[in-house]
Amino acid sequence: MSEPRWLSGPEQKSWRKYLTGSQLLQTQVEADLRENFGIGLAEYEILVRLSEHENRSMRMAQLASDTTMSRSRLTHSVARMEKKGLLARCPIPEDGRGVNCAMTEAGWNLLVSAAPTHVESVRENLVDLLSPAEMAALGTIFSKVTHHLRAKENS
Amino acid sequence: MSEPRWLSGPEQKSWRKYLTGSQLLQTQVEADLRENFGIGLAEYEILVRLSEHENRSMRMAQLASDTTMSRSRLTHSVARMEKKGLLARCPIPEDGRGVNCAMTEAGWNLLVSAAPTHVESVRENLVDLLSPAEMAALGTIFSKVTHHLRAKENS
C-alpha cells in the first residue's frame, strides 16, 4: 500500500469540528423532539416524508431510500410507530412482496403538533447561527456527498 | 405561541441535504472501519483522543466531553473495548470517584493499522469532493454549532 494521503492540518480540524458539531446538533434536535413528543429525529423524518406523498403513504423500499435508513432499521422504527398508532402497514395487492406504509390521522396530528417546536430547534441550533452563504454552503457540501455515495451504491 | 418561524425554501433544502448526506457519510465511514477493523467511528475516536494524551490515558469525564458521548454510551463502548483488550480502566488514587481510561498496546496497534484505511475513507467520501473553501466552511459552520451548544450546556 502506498503512503496514506493523511489529512492536512486544516482538513483534519474541519473534519473533527464537523464530527463534534454534527453529533451535538443531532443530539439536541433529537432531545427536543423526544422530550416534547416522544419521537426521535428519524421518526419525525418518516412522518415528514409520508406527509409529502399522495394519500400520505409510500412503499417501504422508497421510504428507506429517502430517509437513508437501512431496511432493518426502518422496519424497526415503523413497527414501533405502528404500535403507537401513528402509521399502518399493508401489503400492496398488485405486488406480492411490496408493503405500503401509510400515516394515520394520529400520525398527521403528531406531525402538526411537533413541527413548530422542531423548526424552532433547527433554527436556534443551526440556521440562526449561520449566514445565508454558510447555510447554502452546507447544502452544497452535503449534496456532493450524497451524490457521490448514491452513485457508489448504484455502481 | 407566536407563528412559527418556518424555514425558507432554500433553508429547508440545505437542512435536508445535510441530514441525508451526513447520515450517508457516517454510515459509510463507519462501515469501512467496522468491516476492516471491527470497530465503529465512536470507538475509533476514543482511540484517537487517547493517543493524543500523555501516557495515552484520560479521565472518563474528559473523554466523554471530548467525544461528545453521553457518560452511559461512553461507559458501554469502553467496556466493550476493554473486553477486546484495547483499553484498560483504573480508579484514580487521589480522586475517590475518578476513573482513568488508558489505551493498551493492542489498542495502539489497532489505531495504527486502521488509520490509513480510515483517512482514505474520509478523503474519498468527503474531503476529495470539496474545494478547500468548502472544507473550511464545513469547519466554520460546525464550530459555530459546537460553540452555541457548549455554551448552552454550561449555562
Image: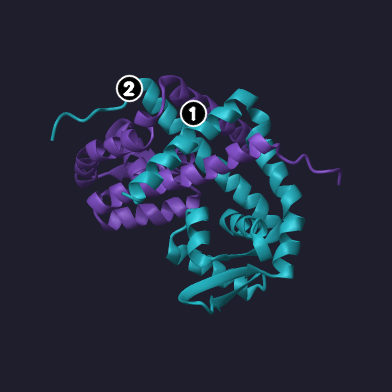
Chain colours: A purple, B cyan
Q: Nearer the viewer, residue A48 or B149?
A: B149
Task: Describe residue A71's horizontal placement relative to residue B155 as left or right.
Answer: right
Q: Residue at x 24, y 28 (%)?
A: B5
Decide: few, some or many residues near mark 2? Use Cα within 10 Å; few <14, some 14-19, many ≥20: few
Q: Which residue is drawn at 60% across and 23% down?
A: B133
Q: Where is residue B99 in the image (x, y as percent from the top left)?
A: 51, 73
* Mark identifier at residue A138: 1
For label 2, the SS is: loop
Is residue A94 in view?
Answer: no
Q: What residue type is labelled 1?
A: Leu
Q: Label 2 vs label 1: CA separation?
A: 15 Å
Residue bearing mark 2: B8
State left or right for residue B128 relative to residue B11.
right
Which quarter of the picture shows residue A8?
top right
Which image quadrant: the N terminus of chain B? Answer: top left
Q: Residue at coordinates 31% horizontally, 31% vertically from top-left?
A: A54
The location of residue A139, given as percent across then percent down, is: 48, 27
B21 vs A26: above or below: above
Q: Mark 2 lies on which chain?
A: B
Q: Mark 1 lies on which chain?
A: A
